[in-house]
Amino acid sequence: MHFKLIMAFVEDARSDDVLDAARAAGATGATVINNARGEGLRQKKTFLGLSLETQRDVLLFLVEEHLSRQILEEIARVGEFDDTSGTGVAVQVDVEDAVGISHQFTEIAERIEEDL
């Protein structure tokens, strides 16, 4: 099996919805990194030196490559990434090798067979 790593940078208020959507689309789990910070095209305003931006979470999904595009598109749809500026961004990268996921092979194989 070949895998992709999907990294989604999401407003923390939308994280649970994005996690649920990714799981429904075929992701078997995720790692969540809380309280990330980022900057887009324009710097966020501050008040007395304190940032007014919302907190972000980084969601990491290690997914089988045949499911990756479907999961990525569902994450973008639920997170409304293309609808509103600053709501989030997601990318996928190739994974050369992975360990610690052998217990998920059966579930992943079943999902792929269902989709094909």
Image: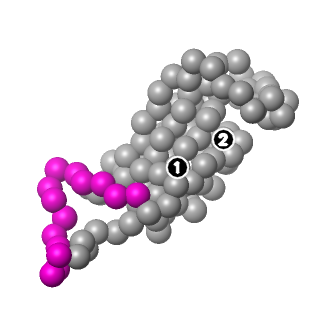
Between the residue at mark 2 and the residue at mark 1, the CA separation in whole angstroms equals: 12 Å
- Does the residue at mark 2 contact the one at mark 1 (Cβ under 8 Å)? no
Q: Is residue 61 above or below residue 98?
A: below
Q: Position of residue 85 (x, y in %)?
A: 26, 55
In the picture, the quarter occupied by the C terminus is: top right
Query: Is residue 14 shown in magenta?
Result: no
Query: Is residue 45 shown in magenta?
Result: yes
Determine the image quadrant of residue 3: top right
Q: Is residue 113 visible?
A: yes
Q: Which residues are magenta?
A: 36-49
Left or right: residue 85 versus residue 56 is: left
Left or right: residue 67 versus residue 18 is: right
**Which residue is found at the position 66% from the left and 41% from the top?**
27
Dot 1 amino acid type: Leu
Mark seen at residue 80:
none
Q: Is residue 114 above or below residue 83?
A: above
Q: Secondary structure at mark 2?
A: loop
Instruction: Determine the residue located farthest toward the bottom in the rendered image.
Output: 48
**Which residue is found at the position 63% from the left and 20% from the top?**
97
Q: Earlier in the sequence, mark 2 or mark 1?
A: 2
Q: Which residue is mark 1?
A: 59
Magenta: main secondary structure equals loop
Q: Position of residue 11 (x, y in %)?
A: 41, 62
Q: Position of residue 17 (x, y in %)?
A: 56, 60
Dot 2 amino acid type: Ala
Q: Which residue is nearer to you in this view: 49 or 32?
A: 49
Q: Which residue is mark 2?
A: 27
Q: Which residue is nearer to you in this view: 19 or 80?
A: 19
Q: Which residue is nearer to you in this view: 5 or 24?
A: 5
Q: Secondary structure at mark 1?
A: strand
Q: Is residue 79 above or below residue 92?
A: below
